[in-house]
Image (cartoon, rainbow, N blue to C red):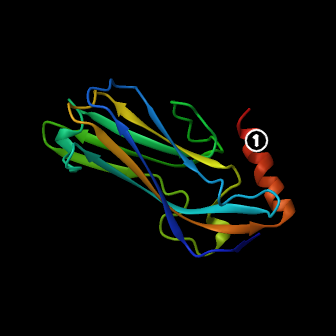
Amino acid sequence: MATAKTGSFYLTETITIPGGTTSGSRVQGTIDLGAYVSVAQGLAVAVESVDFVYQVGNDLGQEAFAMLAGNGAVSAQLTDLNPGTAYVRADNQSLIASAALNIDVANNIGSHTTDLYPDNFGPAALSEAFMVVNDSLYLVAGPDGAPTNVAALSVTARIKCRVVKLGTKDWMAIAIQSTASDN
């Protein structure tokens, strides 16, 4: 299906959720893939894994108790279609990866949950990667259950990927699937 044109590399995007952001609010960031995706050449981006990192304050610490004003969660999604400042359901074809950091402020406990698609243990073949033919990726994150604390909260997506060449039929199939998901 796909032939690798590059070795694996990382793309990153960080969004900052301001201190005092109310529960249910979302912030969005965009990752430009225009330099990697080409319709004419049949080039796409194969996403091999996605890691989410949560940091708080100017010192970028990772103290769970400092992230939210009470018990709750900070969650994030990475998609290849623009959801605006909203989350998509788990069955949406544009969802690449999602994660949640559940925070128990009283006990200073943070439990991180990351979905394992694409396979975060490293694909055995490119066919196991998430193929992106759109020219942007979208990172959306926000607090639930409690507002963010006084300090700003940073959510970073570290995306391990490579540029691949797809056959015409495969490229079109992925493009049609992506477009159909938008309806």
Point out the image quarter for the N terminus. bottom right
Percent position (x, y) of residue 144? Answer: 35, 30
**Which residue does the image show at 17% across and 40% down from the upper left?**
65
Percent position (x, y) of residue 178? Answer: 73, 45
Residue hosting label 1: 179
- Going by the image, does 43 lie left or right of 146? right
Residue with the most extreme top position = 22
Residue 17 in which image quadrant = top left
Circle 1: is it few (<14), some (14-19), or many (20+) Cα within 10 Å?
A: some
- Going by the image, does 44 lie left or right of 31? right
Percent position (x, y) of residue 53? Answer: 35, 53
Residue 147, compared with residue 134, is above or below; it is above
> Circle 1 sits in a helix, a strand or a loop, which is it?
helix
**Which residue does the image show at 28% across and 33% down from the upper left?**
72
- Going by the image, does 115 lie left or right of 70? right
Residue 160, compared with residue 73, is above or below; it is below
Percent position (x, y) of residue 88? Answer: 56, 35
Residue 70, compared with residue 67, is above or below; it is above
Along the viewing direction, whichever of 111 and 147 lies nearer the viewer: 147
Residue 31, compared with residue 20, is above or below; it is below
Point out the image quarter for the C terminus. top right
Residue with the most extreme front position = 35
Numbered circles on residues, count? 1
Residue with the most extreme right position = 169
Amino acid at pointer 1: Thr
